[in-house]
Image (cartoon, helix red, strand yellow):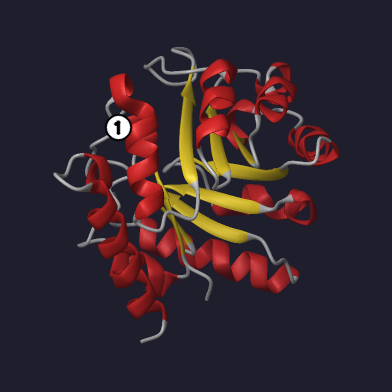
Amino acid sequence: MNIRIAPSILAADFAALGEAVAAAERGGADLIHVDVMDGHFVPNITIGPLVVRALRRVTTVPLFVHLMITDPDRYVEAFAEAGAAMLTVHVEAAPHLHRTLTFIRSLGVQPGVALNPATPVYVLEEVVPEIGHVLVMSVNPGFGGQAFIPRSESKVRAVRDLLDRAGSPAAIAIDGGIDRHTIPGVVAAGAEILVAGVAVFHTDDPAAATRSLKSLAMSQAHA
């Protein structure tokens, strides 16, 4: 299993964002996770394409951009042009999901689908061929630092089963409450991309924290 660590800048110090991202990279970050919130789909407002463009200039790893926004079709092109390597839209916010995913792929960006905690896995069935990754939300989206929802492990297993039955190579990501305590269970369940915010950036040494989380995840994957 190819485990990847994606530190989430939502938990970083925005006054020193470049330094935070550089520290995560030194720790072996495989992706940088960028949470885009609009104050409508989720009760918080964060950043837009300009920040993604700025991050693209200072990082060498791919940007994993998570659109927690209403009407994502209006903005996917702007985020693709800004430098996103992966664009994730919420099934709950994309009424024409197949069209949205195919459009993202046409821009040369890997398309992904995020599922809120209360959204059933079967909603992916009709778009599996278009999916590059699935993001399982293990908290309700909108704010960092929330407690992991335990049932998320079984949800990851259900997504893994659906993808395997369809013969899909799509990766499974998980976001929310990911730390040293939750990593073993989610990796055992089949998660391959681990989004961690507080566990990386609310530490004295984000580089060391990233390295430690990745080592733990890799050891679990090969257990």
Binning the other alpha carbons within 10 Å of mark 1 as few (below 14), some (14 to 19) or many (20 upward) gives many
For residue 182, say whether it is visible. Answer: yes
Q: How many circles with numbers are drawn on the protein? A: 1
Residue 201 to residue 167: above or below? above
Q: Amino acid at mark 1?
A: Ala
Give the residue displayed 44% in from the left and 12% down from the top. 39
Name the side, left or right, on which 175 lies relative to 149: right
Residue farthest to the left, as pictured: 204
**Residue 126 percent across, percent down from the top left:** 76, 50
Give the residue displayed 41% in from the left and 64% down from the top. 154
Task: Look at the numbered disc 1 and give the secondary structure of its residue.
Answer: loop
Residue farthest to the bottom, as pictured: 223
Name the side, left or right, on which 174 lies relative to 217: right
**Residue 199 percent across, percent down from the top left:** 23, 48
Name the side, left or right, on which 68 lies relative to 143: right
Q: Nearer the viewer, residue 20 or 216?
A: 20
**Residue 158 percent across, percent down from the top left:** 52, 64
Q: Quadrant of the C terminus?
A: bottom left
Name the side, left or right, on which 213 lies relative to 45: left
For residue 195, say whether it is visible. Answer: no
**Residue 164 percent across, percent down from the top left:** 66, 72
Give the residue displayed 74% in from the left and 68% down from the top. 166
Where is residue 128, by image quadrant? bottom right
Residue 18 to residue 126: above or below? above
Where is residue 129, by image quadrant? bottom right
* Residue where numbered disc 1 is placed: 12
Give the residue displayed 76% in from the left and 39% down from the top. 101
Q: Nearer the viewer, residue 216 or 119?
A: 216
Residue farthest to the right, as pictured: 106
